[in-house]
Image: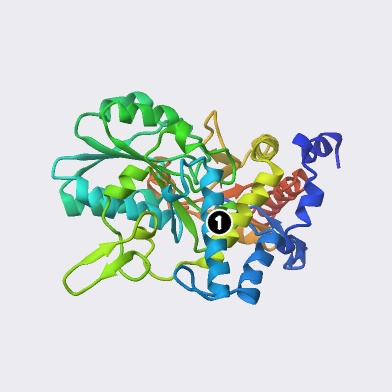
Amino acid sequence: MTQTTTAINTFASLDVNSLRQDFPVLKRQVHGQPLVYLDNAATTQKPKIVIDTVDDFYTRYNANVHRGVHTLSQEATIAYENARETIAKFINAASAQEIVFTRGTTESINLVAQSYGRKQLKPGDEIIISHMEHHSNIVPWQLLCEQTGAILKVIPINAVGELLLEDYAKLLSQKTKIVAIGHISNALGSINPIKQIIQMAHDYHAKVLIDGAQAAPHTAIDVQALDCDFYAFSGHKAYGPTGIGALYAKADLLNAMPPYQGGGEMIKMVSFNKTIYNDIPHKFEAGTPNIAGAIGFAKAVEYIQDIGLTAMAAYEKELLEYATARMKQIAKIRLIGEAQHKASIISFLFEDVHAHDVATILDHQGIAVRAGHHCAMPVMEFYNITASARASFAFYNTTDEIDQLIHGIHKVIEVLGG
């Protein structure tokens, strides 16, 4: 290992080699090669403490939450509601009542569209999103427009993958009711200036939803400082379980919004004549929740906080810079998205070779990258491509692994010629 590599792997006081021991899957082999996991934007791996926490729930005190008087139910309820408190503090929500547990970012966005949006919007109202959004922050708003007669407007991007804020300013008007923007692009890694975007929208009294799926594991989030109205994020992208996520919403908005689904848990009283809904946030959590997922999500957040998001982000920035410099040395590689402010995501093309072929050859070397449109087909259309390969880094990755990626790309060149 070179001196530069050693410095990067210990940057920001992170003992990366020690932290890697927390992740059991990083010890396995794929096709006889040590696993190099570079698909963190799709989902992160889970530390053993999260795995053990979920296992402990099912092993020791598995029970349904709320209203149960027996010991296991009370223990499960306390752990579940403590998890809500942990998530609230993680993003600096004013109260745990402002945290609704969902299946993930996608359900959180759909909840806002169908509960807040369907009640508030009328024909001719406008919703603004951006050209770099994940499908989960496009399709729910298209559905809402079909249901209400609202109009969808799109903020354009430039060649390096940055939002054109001057064009955004021109789109805003008194007709703007909702602005829904990704904090960090999953396809490009671009970090958007969301505080400015929120303020500009609020000048027109529009509500703002931030898709924070990619941001939660990479940057500190303070919803009160941002003054966003809604913030959505997932557990599985932040070292927690799949199938669990959270929606932050200002309490006054949640109180005014109708339930998203009906069933148990979200009620105070039911008769054939009338139903009285539960208080927030339970009004939006119909049915038995993902109790183990919520508890595991909270443990993942605590794990992140123990390491420190500032140190993690600084280290990942070094990884991104190192990988970008190495990739640019390969003439056959074209990088997609080079915004000035980026998270640890690199999307790239290999001449005329399809991204799936690149990813397949890399997989045979034990290197896991994502290939496809990344649920961001409008981004692919903007760059006039059908797919890209994407390497995305977490704090447990190393420059040695980036070197293996570069070696793997040269193997692609060797196999496919050129």
**Residue located at (44% from left, 47% from top):** 385
**Residue located at (21% from left, 46% from top):** 120
**Residue located at (49% from left, 45% from top):** 187
Q: Is residue 380 left or right of residue 37?
A: left
Q: Is residue 239 visible?
A: no
In x, y percent, where is residue 30? 72, 66
In x, y percent, where is residue 69? 50, 74
Disc 1: which residue: 82
User: Which quadrant: the N terminus?
Assistant: top right
Q: Nearer the viewer, residue 52 or 270?
A: 270
- How many residues crowd around disc 1 within 10 Å: few (fewer than 14), some, or many (20 or more)? some
In x, y percent, where is residue 370? 56, 55
Q: Amino acid at mark 1?
A: Asn
Q: Nearer the viewer, residue 197 or 410?
A: 197
Q: How many marks?
A: 1
Instruction: Establish if 10 lies above or below 294.
Output: above
Element on which disc 1 rests: helix
In x, y percent, where is residue 27? 77, 63
